Amino acid sequence: MALLPSGLPDHVDDAEDLARFLVQSKWFKNGMAKPVAFLPYPKDRETSVSRHGQEPADRLWAIGLHVAGDRTLYGVALFKASVVRKEGLEVYPDEPPDFHAVIRDWPWNDSNMTLQKDMQLAMAQVLASEAKLVIKK
Amino acid sequence: MGSAVSTEAKDVFKNTTEVVARTESSMSLFGRKNEVISQLLALANECSTDGWDGGEAMALNRDAVRNVEAFIRAIPDDFPLPDVAPEPDGSVSLDWIRSRHRMFSMSVGSSNKIAYARMNGASRDHGVFSFDYVSIPQGVLVNIMEVMGNGITSFRVA
C-alpha cells in the first residue's frame, strides 16, 4: 500500500476517523450535525472530508481553519469511514491538501434532481445520526 | 347567601377567556411562523451568492426560498415548525429533529416536488411528494408527527 504526502495510506480503512468541518451555523443544532451538512456538492458530486479524528486537536482545527478560509469555522462532525460504506457510499483519498478525502458514489439522476435528493437525504441522515459533533471553542 | 355573579355572567367570562386564549395562541403561532420565515429570509440573504460556504456551494435558489415560505405558512396550527438550512446545490433543507435517531428531513428546490427522508429508530423511509403551495399532504404531516412524537394526536388545518 502506497503512502500519500500526508503519510497516510492511499486506501481509507473502515476504522479511520473522518471529519466534516462545519462552516454554516444552520448545519448543526442541539449537539448534532444535521443531515444537510453531509450532502454532496453538485459540481463534483462529492462531499469533502478530512482523514482526522478529534486528536491531536490543534492539528484538527488547523486543518479546519484551512478548509473554512474566510468563513467562520463552527465545529466538526466526526464519524467512521465504515458508516459511509454501510450506506453504499465510498471514501477516496484526495490529496493535496494533506488529509483530504471525498465521499463519492452518491445516487445521482441527471434528468430529475429531486429523485436523487430523497436517497441522498436518507444516507445523510445516517451519517448525521452516527457523527459526533465537536464545537470549536 | 348565593354568589353575586350570575350563571350567564360566568358563561360569558368563560367564553371570553377561551376566545382570548385562542387568539393569543393564534398570535403566538403567527409569531413563531414569522420567526422561521425571518430566519429563512436572513439565510437567503447570507447565501445569496455562489461560494457562500467558502467553497463551491451554489446560491440559494429564489424559487426554493419562496416554496419554503409557502410550505411554512401551510403548516397546521399546533404543529412543530422545522429548522431551515442552506444546501450546497441552492435548495433549502427543512428538518424536524427529535433525537439523533428520530428525524424528518426535506429538501425544497425550485419545483413543487419535495424530497424527504424519515428516520424513526430502526424504521427508515424516503420519497418525493407534490406540494400545491396551499396544503401539505396528510401523510407527510402524520410522518412528522410520528417522528416528533410529542404527544400531538390531532391538529387543525390552517
Image (spheres, rainbow, N blue to C red):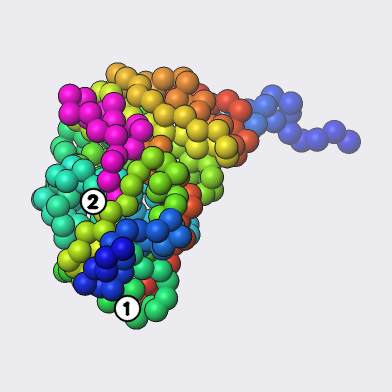
**Residue A133 pos. (x, y %):** 44, 62
For disc 2, the marked residue is B42
Residue at 76% x, 35% y is B4
Dot 2: what SS? helix
Image-based side of B140 in relation to A103, left or right? right
Q: CA distance from mark 1 to mark 2?
A: 33 Å
* A44, A129: nearer the viewer: A44
- The residue labelled by disc 1 is A59
Q: In the figure, B9 relative to A121: above or below?
A: above
Image x and y of residue A106, in percent: 29, 39
Residue B116 among magenta residues: no
Could you say which quadrant of the image residue B110 lies in? top left
Q: Is residue A52 left or right of residue B148?
A: left
Residue B75, x across and y down, in percent: 41, 30
Q: Which mark is residue B80?
A: none
The magenta-colored residue range is A103-120
Question: Quick check: B87 above or below B135?
Answer: below
Is residue B79 among the parts visible in the rendering? no
Residue at the image point whose x is 39% and y is 79% from the top: A56
Is residue A70 toward the left or the right of residue B79 in the image?
A: left
| Amino acid under disc 2 | Ala
Between residues B82 and B6, which one lies in front from this camera angle?
B82
Chain to which the residue tagged by mark 1 belongs: A
